[in-house]
Image: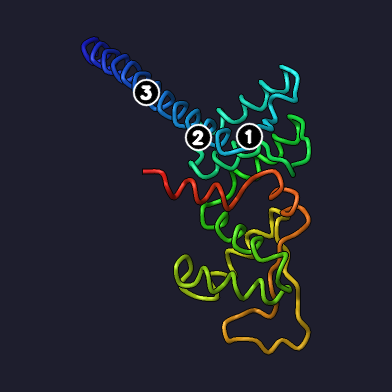
Amino acid sequence: MFLSAIVSKVFDEFATRTFGIVLRSIMNKRAESAREIALEEIRSGNGNIVLNSLDQDEAVAILWRYLRAAEEGAARINLRLMASIMAGNKTAPFIHADEFLIWSDLLTSLTKTEIVLLANLHKECSALDWSQRDEVTRKAMIPQYFQTEHEFEIAAFALIRTGLIVQIAISGWDGPEGRLGGVFKTSPRMTKLARLADFEGALSREANVP
């Protein structure tokens, strides 16, 4: 019994020490990757860095939220979009830390496929009507990201939760087989977010990472 207790304690201490070393290594790698992404986005911007316009407390709050997302394992593209907001641009409205926290929570909840869908749908918003935007987006994503119309619509419906897209119902729908009777379009909320975060640019820069 005594020997079992000693053995158990030794293994517990070894596991704890090893776990701590491994965890620190993982956290350091994530922090370094997040730093590189932030610097890349700042270099790709126009010098209108959001953090420069904020007081110290707000700037720290934004950086802390960004680093926390990295520590929790947020994907690189999600971090890049967050960093894009920090980097700023000429058309972006001024934001405070509390707004950055809201956008960060939203961005970290998105999958890469959802980000691509949003970028494609928003890209066509100025030149085409609702149904054309929807059609062009579907053609860009099927079958590269989705095998069927049904899979595309499941993902689009899931994005409605974010308030970034909406579905427009069409009365007397007689569209292609497999569609549920409407088209998807970006919302004013997505328009605002796209002014803050460079979706197309972030996806392009991430695709070029070796």
User: Looking at the image, how many numbered discs can be counted on the residues?
Assistant: 3
The amino acid type found where label 1 is placed reads Ala
Mark 3 vs mark 2, foreground winner is 2
Q: Distance between the residues labelled 1 and 3?
A: 27 Å
Q: Quadrant of the N terminus?
A: top left
Instruction: Using the rendered view, name the quadrant where residue 29 is placed.
Output: top left
- Graded by Cα atoms within 10 Å as few (under 14), some (14 to 19) or many (20 or more), the crowding at tag 3 reads few
Task: Work out which residue is located at the far left of the displayed protein and give it.
Answer: 3
The amino acid type found where label 2 is placed reads Ile
Residue bearing the label numbered 1? 87
The amino acid type found where label 3 is placed reads Ser
Mark before the other along the chain sequence, 2 or 1: 2
Q: Distance between the residues labelled 3 and 2?
A: 18 Å
- Graded by Cα atoms within 10 Å as few (under 14), some (14 to 19) or many (20 or more), the crowding at tag 1 reads many
Residue bearing the label numbered 2? 37
Question: Residue 26, labelled with which disc?
Answer: none
In the image, residue 2 sits, relative to residue 67, either above or below, namely above
Point 34% across, 19% down: residue: 21
Mark before the other along the chain sequence, 3 or 2: 3
Instruction: Using the rendered view, name the quadrant where residue 187 is placed.
Output: bottom right
Residue bearing the label numbered 3? 25
